[in-house]
Image (cartoon, helix red, strand yellow):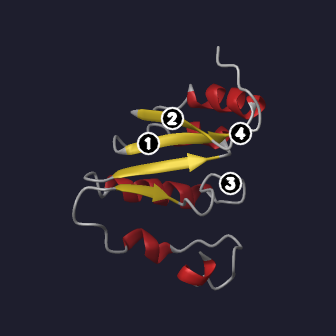
Amino acid sequence: MAARFKPGNGFAPSLLPDRLSEKWPQKPSRIGVCFMSDLFGDWVPTDWIKRTIYATTLHPEHVHVFLTKNPKRLPEFNPWPANAWVGVSVTNQEQYEEAIRHLAQVDAKVKFLSMEPLLERIAID
């Protein structure tokens, strides 16, 4: 992926403001937001996350899929735009329990779990 997109600093975190105003698909699409990174990582400034979420409101014809391994930041951005799907990636029981706790506090139309790769059996209560 690095060869395809040619990031100037390899895989170090980058904030690319021009990407928020790039040409968008003409037909309604699902757009994976920061799928090569984690928009909600502790290293990402809150203002940048807000700008990224705001960009989704400018394109309500698209579904914007947000996925993180750091769910504790998700409730900060309530309420979420109607065209945002908000999810957490989990691989084990501990991550599952943390994800459920934080997703319960998220005000989004669609909330989901991505459970892969599962590293252990997860008990869902």
The foreground one among 20 and 65 is 65
- Of mark 3 and mark 1, the one earlier in the sequence is 3
- Residue lying at 74% horizontally and 27% vertically, measured from the top left: 121
Amino acid type of the residue tagged 4 in the rendering: Thr
The residue that mark 1 highlights is 85
Q: Position of residue 10 (x, y in %)?
A: 69, 80
Q: Is residue 33 left or right of residue 97?
A: left
The residue that mark 2 highlights is 112
Taking 105 as reference, is 13 above or below it? below
For marks 1 and 2, give the CA distance.
Answer: 8 Å
* Pointer 1 with pointer 4, Cβ within 8 A: no
The residue that mark 4 highlights is 91
The quadrant in which residue 15 appears is bottom right
For marks 4 and 2, give the CA distance.
Answer: 14 Å
Nearer the viewer's eye, disc 3 or disc 1?
1
For marks 3 and 1, give the CA distance.
Answer: 18 Å
Nearer the viewer's eye, disc 4 or disc 2?
4
Tell me the crowding category of disc 1: few under 14, some 14 to 19, or many 20 or more residues within 10 angstroms, Cα based.
Answer: many
- Residue lying at 62% horizontally and 61% vertically, measured from the top left: 37
Please state the total of marks drawn on the protein image: 4
The residue that mark 3 highlights is 41
Q: Is residue 67 left or right of residue 29?
A: right
